[in-house]
Image (tube, rainbow, N blue to C red):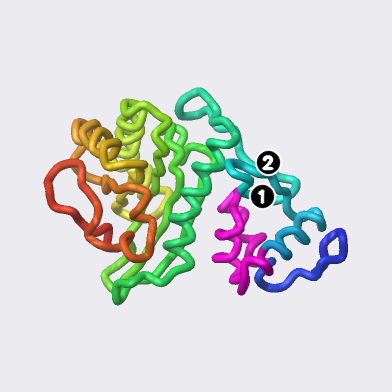
Amino acid sequence: MAGSSGIVLQDRERRLLDATQSLIVFNRDQAMEVAGYPSIRRANQRLRQLVRAGLLRRTFIGSHEAVYWLAGKPARKKNRAENGAAEPAALFIRHRLEINRVHLLVQYRSIPVPGWWFGTWQSFSKPLVATVPLIPDGYFEVGSPQGIRAIFVEVDLGTEAVPVLARKASLYVQLAASGGFTQIFRRNQFRVLIITTSERRLQNIRQAIAKVTDKLFWLGTLDLISAEKFWTASWHRPTGDQLQSIL
């Protein structure tokens, strides 16, 4: 398969372009994880070729960090359903890159707990159900011989007021109580990961959620997005002192 400038797509490029449907935007390191490029040099070369071929678009954020997205599609989808305001582009991209870190961790790295495997990942651009104005950052399933575990993901970069996050927590409770989740996903239960910037921020969110529910939620900080920590007993619940695993 060749692009508009004659580039011959290898399997790794097809895999990357397919993954971009859910990643939305990505950086070079994330491209390397999806496509399996053997070196930074090779990744940079192929990404430049994909841009020149008109298959990807590129911009720069922060200290000249390149980010990419599918040509012909917006780098972000303006979404006003939850708080009435669209995120600035740079903030949206930073937020998306952190969501992608979770996505790539659960899908492209083996789960270091015997008997567990990756099932699926989903991204969303509109509310799950018309009666609950909730747009999760992501959703994945992992399985074991005992069954499937359904997990929503929320990444907080500290830009929203804690009461806004507490309201979103109440929408998850509503989703569970209404039966909407079971109807859509054909699962009986779900968990929600809230991943935020600092321990102090985590404790503030935790206290607010505890006023809504002591169920559903597991809370952690961005440093947990690693193969060494993500699957371990490193997560806070809304109440209680004991750290728990999400499995």
User: Quick one: 108 or 31, which is closer to the camera?
Assistant: 31
Secondary-structure class at tag 2: loop
Q: Is residue 18 left or right of residue 122?
A: right
Give the quadrant of residue 113. bottom left
| Magenta region | 14-43
Tell me the residue at 76%/55% (across/down): 51
Residue 146: where, in percent of width, then height? 26, 70
Query: Would residue 33 be counted in the magenta stretch?
Result: yes
How packed mark 1 is, by other alpha carbons closer than 10 Å (few <14, some 14-19, many 20 or more), is many
Amino acid type, residue under disc 1 in the picture: Trp
Query: Would residue 57 be counted in the magenta stretch?
Result: no
Secondary-structure class at tag 1: strand
Amino acid type, residue under disc 2 in the picture: Pro
Tell me the residue at 73%/49% (across/down): 57
Residue 10: where, in percent of width, then height? 72, 72
Q: Is residue 173 left or right of residue 118?
A: left
Q: Quadrant of the C terminus?
A: bottom left
User: Quick one: 117 or 228, which is closer to the camera?
Assistant: 228
Q: What is the number of the mark on residue 69?
A: 1
User: Quick one: 214 or 235, which is closer to the camera?
Assistant: 235
Q: Is residue 169 left or right of residue 30?
A: left
Q: What is the number of the mark on residue 74?
A: 2
Q: What is the number of the mark on residue 38?
A: none
Give the answer, above or below, for where 30 lies relative to 170. Answer: below
Give the quadrant of residue 16. bottom right
Q: Quadrant of the N terminus?
A: bottom right
Mark 1 in CB contact with mark 2 (< 8 angstroms): yes
Residue 122: where, in percent of width, then height? 49, 53
Tell me the residue at 67%/67% (across/down): 41
How packed mark 2 is, by other alpha carbons closer than 10 Å (few <14, some 14-19, many 20 or more), is few
Residue 193: where, in percent of width, then height? 33, 48
Tell me the residue at 40%/39% (across/down): 156
